[in-house]
Amino acid sequence: MKISLAEPSLPRSGALVVGVSEDRVLSRTAAAVDGKTGGALSRALKSGRFRGAKNQIIELLAPGGIAASRVVMVGLGKAKELDALAAQAIGGTIVGHLGKSGERTAAIAVDSPKGAKLKAVEMAANLAYGARLGSYRFDRYRTKEKPEKKPSLRTLSVMVKDRTAASRAFSRLDKIADGVFLTRDLVSEPANVLYPESLARQARTLTKLGVKVEVLGQARMEKLGMGALLGVAQGSPRQPQLVVMRWDGAARGADKQPLAIVGKGVTFDTGGISIKPSKGMEDMKWDMGGAGTVIGLMRALAGRKAKANVVGVVGLVENMPSGMAQRPGDVVTSASGQTIEVINTDAEGRLVLADALWYTQNRFKPKAMIDLATLTGAIIVSLGHVHAGLFSDNDKLSQDLAAAGQAEGELVWRFPLHAEYDKEIDCDIADMKNVGSGGGAGSITGAQFLKRFTNNVPWAHLDIAGMAWSKKGKPTVPKGGTGFGVRLLDRLVADRYEPK
């Protein structure tokens, strides 16, 4: 779908979308259209339950007095609550509604209601952004879908007086959407298409945007002593990869020390010898969600030319059972030199991250390091599909992440780290075990494990197991791969690591 910003005018065809605030208060354009149609909008409002609550929709087909094929009235809610996230949700709601209508073109008239937090320019940019996010579909493998089942909308214009300023604002958001879409695509791909080598090739495409991409193969990782990551990969014929992506956007003379983002990239997780139940195992194609987020983030940062230095590192493996697979009870030596007894081969993501985190801090000496992983089912038990789990040894970094998540609607909730939990992974024959001995606090002990490989760099771990995939759609997040974390981390970089 093509989205553009345009000067205000009544369309000569297609759908016209106008806003109505709570208590049926017509926007300026809606009031003008009401006059041209002989009060048709007012009559429609009086005849139904539509009150202008946020995301409510009512429409009039072929109203007399104007050329538009239909007028769609969308609820803006309370003016004082109309912020960027609300505008994005409205944009996604409009696209979701019109996509089923048969309309091919539509125009949204933007009038910021009195008392709103957003100016018309910001509202227009965020409506367009929400519409783009909500338009996402992963349908490349559908070969027999009926035309009436496909979204009909092809072009959407968002009309606002200062089109130039709105276009500039939307252009930046549009680049972030590119990153979100890349992550959604990667997370949605089946494991026979997306595996370590092919995912590394996807990361290499970012060089077109100015990202420096380096791929370390198995031989290089063996020389670096990455026994934890390689142990996970040894059951699969697919070769493991460690991908390093660098965006050097800081100005000359600025602090060159980067922010580091590290992602778990298990392209398919059977559980290995500790094999998972067959029911739902197909979902494990998205166990590379953390890596997908890092790759999407790097695209977003490069696309909008972020003025910060950021390094993204992803460890890519496939966890399979075979005659060569890692066994429960095996002991591996990580790149840090610390040894790990593998109690459960299905606790593999932390082994991949152990070496990726150590490598990242050792090579790049980052000012802070954040990892993302679909690490534990326990986090879903704790938080469901509303918040990601946040674990950190740094209060400031935790506060910054929580604020960025709140601003972008990608919520995180902080969990404790404590020495008593750390004791759960102490081991009799090695430096540590890869799972806790007590059977509880699985997400916390997973984070305590990762902390041992951060070497005192300010660090945060985001357990996104409940957030990388959704079986229920929202206005800006269709069901399937969500792209969770791209917007959150882009906001963190913008607010905390770029010059004001």
Image (cartoon, rainbow, N blue to C red):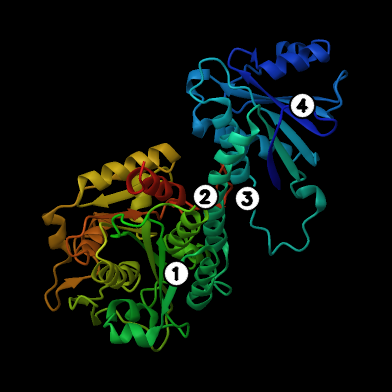
Q: CA distance from mark 1 to mark 4?
A: 45 Å
Locate residue 169: give its quadrant. Answer: top right
- On residue 136, which mark appears? 3
Residue holding disc 1: 212
Amino acid tagged 2? Ile
Q: Earlier in the sequence, mark 2 or mark 4?
A: 4
Residue 380 location, x and y as percent? Answer: 38, 50
Q: Are marks 1 and 4 in contact (CB under 8 Å)?
A: no
Would you say 98 lies left or right of 209 here? right
Q: Earlier in the sequence, mark 1 or mark 4?
A: 4
Q: Earlier in the sequence, mark 2 or mark 1?
A: 2
433, above or below 146, in the image? below
Residue holding disc 4: 9
Q: CA distance from mark 2 to mark 3?
A: 14 Å
Q: Are marks 3 and 4 in contact (CB under 8 Å)?
A: no
* SS type, badge 2: helix
* SS type, badge 1: strand
Question: For the residues carrying marks 3 and 4, which lies nearer the camera in this image?
Answer: 4
Q: Are marks 3 and 1 in contact (CB under 8 Å)?
A: no
